[in-house]
Image: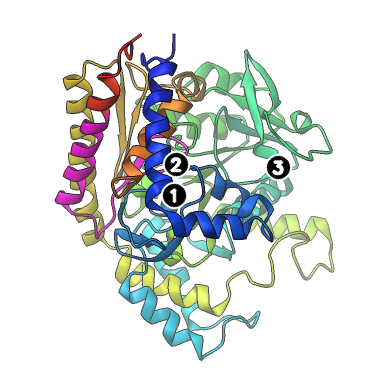
Amino acid sequence: MTASGISPAAVEVFAQKQRQLFLQANPKSQALAERARQSLYGGVPMHWMADWSTPVPLFVERAKGARFYDVDGHEYIDFCLGDTGSMFGHSPEPIAQAIAEQGNRGLTTMLPGEDAVVCGELLAQRFGLPYWQVTATATDSNRYVLRWARAITQRKTLLVFDGCYHGTVDDVMVRDRDGTTVARSGLIGQAYDLTQYSRSIPFNDVAALEAALAQGDVCALLCEPAMTNIGMVLPEPGFMQQCRELTRKYGSLLIIDETHTISTDIGGCTRLWHLDPDFFVLGKPIAGGVPCGIFGCSAAMAEQMNQARQRASANSHGHSGMGTTLSANALAMHCMRANLEQVMTPAAYAHMLPLAKRLADGFRQLISKHQLKWSVTELGARSEFQFCAVSPKTGAEAEAAFHDELQMALHLYLINRGILITPFHNMTLCCPSTSAADVDKLISTLDQALDELLAIPGARE
């Protein structure tokens, strides 16, 4: 029996009809897909762009606010928003203006400008950590912070939670299997044994956390305050505080990655829940959709970083293996400043959060109406319906609730009717341009999808 309680045979009947509808309605996307196969590996500029529910990639013409438009002229309400990259909407006016302003003033120089100083001050004020660095992506930020953590503690082992998401950092590509750390399945081209210096434990498991830290070799716990990529998993009350207390007890650092959980509040979970990390990481939305990442550290860590540099080399002028020539480029800094000052504001969250609550409540009503043993998890502007009766507490529980074919079929039904949600699970995000009518349309369209699916003979297992 599937986790969702819906039969695979009924899902395939439902999905096949949706695939046919998509192909009939999107001839230009089909033509571009065929053309792209001649020059792009897999027919897309990045391989995961082919992992959506559509039979061929959906090619976008333009995007603005909470909407985008494909090459066949269809309009879509966007609840994916670049999987947080456009969390505050596509091309907010202040960001578009900042791009235009900086376009003729230089894009990258390897030198700072006033924007960098202002951004540092704004980040310190917002997140409560005094010192900041700017990177090209959150993956880079995590990679560099991990180097600092190992240099500061002079320990090698990284601790992560099973099912975590920290970009494409090699060291996090591990899972927990019955108490043993193993390499993540599907890992390509990995030359060395990741389990030598990476350890994975279940989320929300205080005993496992303490046992892992007590071994005395952990440089840092790198974690999301709530898991988002394996399916949304919220911390149990007090769990994040235990993470802080236990890392301090055993001499490990606490790194909080809020690249997705910044949907919670203007200062993220870090400020909202008083997490007090040693390092803080954020990427995707920080510059309004322009590639950029940041990491911040406490005053104590800044001093330890200085000492680590002295240990590395008395004549060292750089940080070996950290930074790229495009890190903190002038365009990204100008856009980050505009985003922090004018886009990523309390007013934006005041609009987004109630709409996300309305959406989560709507999902719960549908689940009840259709008598499904599903649940809903919400975190600020983000919510997700999951194919399990109770919201999961660990990455393994979230993964056990997957029914990939059903998820893909429902997503394609929505796409065929002008609605996009996050492709890899049933997650949604509201932005400042999202309206109550947009939320209601998603709910009503999903209601229609479930009506049609459950009307198929034998749909319920």
**Residues at circles 2 and 1 in contact by the CB criterion of under 8 Å:** yes
How many C-alpha atoms fall within 10 Å of the one at disc 1: few (<14), some, or many (≥20)?
A: some
Residue numbers of the magenta segment: 421-449
Q: Indicate which label's residue lies in the foreground, 3 or 1.
A: 1
Q: Quadrant of the C terminus?
A: top left
Residue 234 visible in this rendered orientation of the protein: no
Asked which secondary structure carries label 1, the reply is helix
Q: Give the residue number, with chain letter if any, for mark 2.
A: 423
Q: Position of residue 143 (x, y in %)?
A: 66, 50
Q: Give the residue number, with chain letter if any, for mark 1.
A: 83
Asked which secondary structure carries label 2, the reply is loop
Q: Give the residue number, with chain letter if any, for mark 3.
A: 170
Q: Indicate which label's residue lies in the foreground, 2 or 3.
A: 2
In which quarter of the view is residue 324 placed? Answer: bottom right
Q: Position of residue 56 (x, y in %)?
A: 51, 47
Tell me the amino acid under the disc marked 1. Asp
Mark 2 or 1, nearer chain start: 1
